[in-house]
Every structure is written in C-alpha cells, then in structure tokens.
Image (cartoon, rainbow, N blue to C red):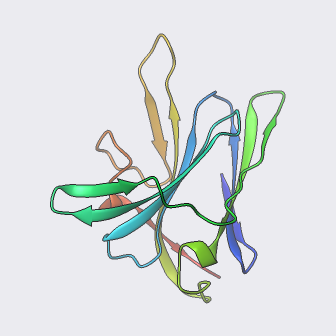
Amino acid sequence: MRVKHDGAALCVRFECEDSEVVEVFIDPVGDGECYFEFEVNPLGTLLDLVLRRNRSGYAKDFAWACDGFEAPVERTAVGWTAELRIPFASIAAEAPLPGAEWRVNFTRIDRPRDGEWELTAWSPTLLGTFHAVERFGAMRFL
C-alpha cells in the first residue's frame, strides 16, 4: 500500500495477491464522531459510506456518495492493483495543509473458502473488526 496526495485528493494504491476487498477509513476531524469508509474489490466494485456516532455505536449512511471517488482496478500476474482517489472536497471543509493530521486506517480482508478470515490493517485494531476509530493511526500531511 502506498499513499500520496495531489493537493485535491488522497490517492491510495494497493497491490494485492488475494481476491478480496481493500478498504480505507478516514476521520479527517479526528474526534471519532464521524468517519468515512471506501472499499474496492478486484472486480472494481466500489462502496463509499459515512458512519456517524449515535447512542448505540455508529449508524452507516449508504445514501451518502463521495463526489469524484474513483478506484480503477488492474489485474497483474500475481493478483491485482487498485488506485483509490478520494477528493478532499467531499470529505473535509478544505484540503489538509502541511502538518495536518488525520486519523486513518488502510485495510484488507481475505475470506478464503476453506480457511479463516484474514483481517490486515496498517494500524491493527486487534478487535476482529476494522470499525474501531479509536485505533486508527495518525497520518501527517507533508
């Protein structure tokens, strides 16, 4: 996984060997009240949603759509790649300035037919779920 930004969007490249989904979680404010989830699978199927804290945890808003979100997928000799482009304008009031920190996590799920699920994260949650905003890592913009 590699991450960069182009001033207008966060760009995340995954290089995958398995056949399952990769995900990006972003809390640009860092208060745990609301965060965004972006997913893509090897077929190029996209999912974007926002999660908002409520009394019982988080409510998933599937009606929200990230304007300009794209994630082209390519097959490779050993798997597939995905290049997610998440426009800042759709998830924050403004593009992050140098030194800004966002709470994020970059994850993958592999669900083999004859084995246990494998959940891998840049910032491991250690909870059996990636929906643990308090365990997201801090990403500092340069």
Give the camera-side residue of 21 and 58.
Answer: 58
The relative height of residue 63 versus residue 119 in the rendered view (above or below) is below
Give the camera-side residue of 43 and 24.
Answer: 43
Task: Give the residue at x 41% y 65%.
Answer: 35
Question: Which image quarter holds the C terminus?
Answer: bottom right
> What is the x, y in percent for residue 20?
58, 31
The outermost residue toward the right is: 77
The relative height of residue 104 versus residue 88 in the rendered view (above or below) is above
> What is the x, y in percent for residue 99?
56, 87
The outermost residue toward the top is: 114
Task: Give the residue at x 70% y 33%.
Answer: 43
Task: Give the residue at x 32% y 70%.
Answer: 32
The outermost residue toward the left is: 55
> What is the x, y in percent for residue 68?
70, 65
Answer with the quarter of the image where residue 56 lies: bottom left
Q: How many marks?
A: 0
> What is the x, y in percent for residue 18?
63, 28
In the image: residue 121, left or right of residue 42: left
Give the camera-side residue of 1 and 7.
Answer: 7
In the image: residue 101, left or right of residue 90: left
